[in-house]
Structures are given as structure tokens and as C-alpha cells.
């Protein structure tokens, strides 16, 4: 994962699937991926994010807080997903 923050406080988390199968020359898709990111790295008060991927419809997810971390649930991860987190 790579996190980028804009000057206005919004953030984008770039999530890459690194599970490559050399035999089939394909990435293995992952289902129900849960990420936990320190809350201090994301915009204060953020409660929702948009999931963007080349092969899926844009989706909005909630960002629940748990013990100083924010949980981000990806329904699936094929090649990559960008988690766009606006400043509230």
C-alpha cells in the first residue's frame, strides 16, 4: 500500500495485489480484504471512502474506527484498488 495526501487534507491509499502465480501468469484475486490503517494518517473525521478499480464499479464504504485505527473493507482486490478518502 502507498498513501498519498493532498494539500487540502484528502488522501488516497493505493492497494496493489502482489499475489502473482508464475505458473498461470495471472494474479490471484482476493476477496473480502480488510485493511487497518493508523487513524493519524487519514483525514481527521473521515467516515466514508470511495473504492476505485479498473474492473469494478465505484463503491462507497464506511470507515469504522477501532483502537486508533481505521478499518477499510475491500469486497475484492484483483490487480489494484484506490481508496479515495475526502477531507470531511
Image (spheres, rainbow, N blue to C red):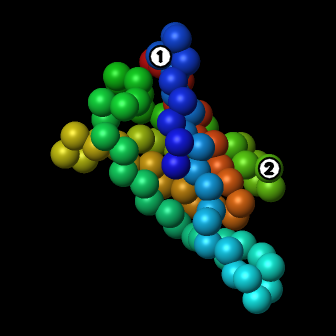
State the image quarter where residue 83 is shown: top right
Of the pair 58 and 42, the residue shown nearer to us: 42
Asked if residue 9 lies left or right of residue 38, the reply is right
Q: Are marks 1 and 2 in contact (CB under 8 Å)?
A: no
| Residue placed under numbered mark 2 in the picture | 54
Q: Secondary structure at mark 1?
A: loop
| Residue placed under numbered mark 1 in the picture | 9
* Residue 10 locus on image (x, y percent): 52, 21
Q: Which residue lies at the image location 34% right of the left edge and 22% below the top edge?
A: 44
- Residue 37 vs 47, above or below: the answer is below
* Residue 65 locus on image (x, y percent): 29, 42
Binning the other alpha carbons within 10 Å of mark 1 as few (below 14), some (14 to 19) or many (20 upward) gives some
Viewer can see residue 51 = no
Binning the other alpha carbons within 10 Å of mark 2 as few (below 14), some (14 to 19) or many (20 upward) gives few
Task: Give the number of the disc on residue 22.
Answer: none
Which residue lies most toward the front here?
22
Asked if residue 53 lies left or right of residue 10, the reply is right
- Residue 78 vs 25, above or below: the answer is above
* Residue 13 locus on image (x, y percent): 54, 39
Number of dots carrying numbers: 2
Query: How far apart are the alpha carbons under marks 1 and 2?
Result: 25 Å
Q: Which residue lies at the image location 44% right of the left edge and 59% below the top edge?
A: 34
- Residue 6 vs 29, above or below: the answer is above
Q: Secondary structure at mark 2?
A: loop
Q: Which residue lies at the image location 52% right of the left edge and 66% below the top edge?
A: 32
Q: Which residue lies at the image location 52% right of the left edge and 11% below the top edge?
A: 7
Is tag 1's residue or tag 2's residue first in the polypeptide sequence? 1
Which residue lies most toward the top here?
8
Viewer can see residue 57 = yes
State the image quarter where residue 88 is shown: top left
Amino acid at each position: 500500500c502507498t498513501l498519498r495526501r493532498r494539500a487540502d487534507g484528502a488522501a488516497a491509499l493505493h492497494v496493489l495485489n502482489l499475489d502473482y502465480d508464475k505458473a498461470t501468469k495471472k494474479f490471484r484475486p482476493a476477496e473480502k480484504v480488510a485493511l487497518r490503517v493508523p487513524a493519524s494518517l487519514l483525514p481527521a473525521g473521515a467516515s466514508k471512502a470511495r473504492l476505485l478499480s479498473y474492473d469494478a464499479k465505484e463503491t462507497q464504504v464506511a470507515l469504522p474506527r477501532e483502537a486508533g485505527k481505521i478499518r477499510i473493507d475491500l469486497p475484492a482486490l484483483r490487480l489494484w484498488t484506490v481508496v479515495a478518502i475526502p477531507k470531511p
